[in-house]
Image: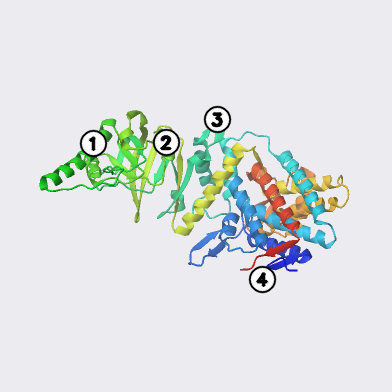
Amino acid sequence: MFILEEDTQRTSGEDAQSSNITAGKAVSEAVRTTLGPRGMDKMLVSDSGDVVITNDGATILNEMDIEHPAAQMISEVAETQEDEVGDGTTTAAVLAGELLSKAEDLLDDDVHPTTIVEGYYEAAAMAHDAIDEVTLDTDLDDELLGKVAKSSMTGKGTGDVSAEDLAEVVVDAVRRVTVDGRVVRDNISVHAQTGSSSSATRLVEGLIIDEEPLHDNMPRSLEDVTVAFVGDDIEVREANIDAEYNVSSVDDLNTAIESEQNELQGYVDHVLDVGVDVLFVDGDVASHVQAALAKEGVMVLENKHDDGEELAFATGLTPVANVSSLEAEDLGHAESVSVEKFGDETLTFLEGGADGQAVTVFARGGTEHVADELERVLGDALDVVTAAVDQGGVVPGAGATEIAIADHVRDEAASVEGRKQLAVEAFADAIDVLPRTLAENTGMDPIDALVDLRAEFEREDIAGIISEGQTGVIDDPVDYGVLDPVAVKHEAVESAAEASTMIVRIDDVISASN
């Protein structure tokens, strides 16, 4: 009896498990060489010829054309990591792949998948405890947050500017949008622009708007200005019903034209009476209104597909639905609004808003590839500093936290009964892949480095791999300012464990016919 379509493909049992695990390991291996400060970049070329050069795990896996469903699950691990904490995407993907590799060995030894899953979950709980134990008991001042930002950017494509200099910009941005101890991350934007070296990157205390004034005669620079936002067209109103107008003479035509101009002039007079210096409009603006406001020195910019929320955060304005409802109390304030030309592109800078709750990191790069990668790097750095402030502090980086996790899980494994103990020990062995990969990418012998790390940890309770010159040394990463947000470690363990256990439990793959 056939219960599936004739062309349906079905893989079950060991074949299904092997296929899924192999696919997951392959994706993990694809990003493994990008881990750490000496990690390598990947060049990704799309069907249309677009090129992306990056060592960001989430970007690499997102750009790859992954078809295998199990491999897609590993890609989703990196995506989840990126969405939740903004960094550690490669860590999560590499760990998930190694957990699958260890699970494959256990399956070969006839350990049941359910036993592996239960053991992994117990080990993950132990890992979280270990992370909490190594969390540094210290105040998150600007210096410490700068080290967190620098650690996330070291070894990435920052052009001719140092990670330390960029870290200052990142911390400054985060501090400016911190309200009652919480970071309003959505109020920080990163705008990448080619045409200058990366060292020209700076923080704009306000917004960068990819628009220019609507009329050539409008001012290009204003200071101490009032700002308004209108969420509709400023044009002649259209009738709500279908109607025909019969114009039988020139006088009738002139009357109709005069009526429209009076309506438009009424809008202009209202804007001037309210006292608007800079007007943002989510819609079209009639040419008569543009010219009249330009004559009065008012700057008007289209800001389509925006509800005015960012402008409200930056200037304190209140968005209004249409120009007729605009009142003086709806206006915001900015210290300056200026228009600048960058090659063929024109940008408007709104700075020094009254509320000052929105900032923009203006990332510069000599080429589009450099600018795009710097935008990604800065975005990750902003996310990790936000995670450190919002979600519970920092832990030692450079593989030190992973060494502590592996040691703790091995110690606790003795208390686990039955075959689950094998899975718990396998989890600890899988964690070792992270410091081992760091060592390999740094130029050290991975086996020797792992042995030295464990020995140093036994003596000092902390040990990490510090990149120096063409190789690395075993030392205390805290002394070198190598720190990671605790949230990044928790999320990496959680997402990697969930993805790997989900894949291990699958014993049947049914693919529908095309």
Q: Mark 3: few, some, or many residues within 10 Å (few <14, many ≥20)?
A: few
Mark 1 → mark 4, Cα distance in angstroms = 70 Å
Is 124 on the left or on the right of 191, as rendered? right
Q: Secondary structure at mark 1?
A: helix
Residue type of the residue flagged with mark 3:
Asp
Mark 2 → mark 3, Cα distance in angstroms = 19 Å
CB-based contact (under 8 Å), mark 1 and mark 3: no
Mark 1 → mark 3, Cα distance in angstroms = 44 Å
Instruction: Name the residue: 65% across, 34% down.
Output: 138
Of label 1 and label 4, which has the lower sequence position?
Answer: 4
Q: Which residue is mark 3?
A: 180
- The numbered mark at residue 7 is 4
Residue reaching furthest to the right: 418
Determine which quarter of the picture holds residue 131.
top right
Mark 1 against mark 4, which lies toward the viewer?
A: 4
Mark 1 against mark 3, which lies toward the viewer?
A: 1
Q: Which residue is mark 1?
A: 266
Determine which quarter of the picture holds residue 196.
bottom left
Of label 1 and label 2, which has the lower sequence position?
Answer: 1
Is residue 376 at least partly visible in the picture?
yes
Depicted 237 relative to depicted 509: above or below = above
Residue 148, given in percent of the width and then of the height, sits at 60, 43
Q: Which residue is mark 2?
A: 312
Mark 1 → mark 2, Cα distance in angstroms = 26 Å
- The numbered mark at residue 129 is none
Q: How is the image coloured?
A: rainbow
Q: Secondary structure at mark 3?
A: loop
Residue 326, given in percent of the width and then of the height, sits at 33, 33
Quadrant including the C terminus: bottom right
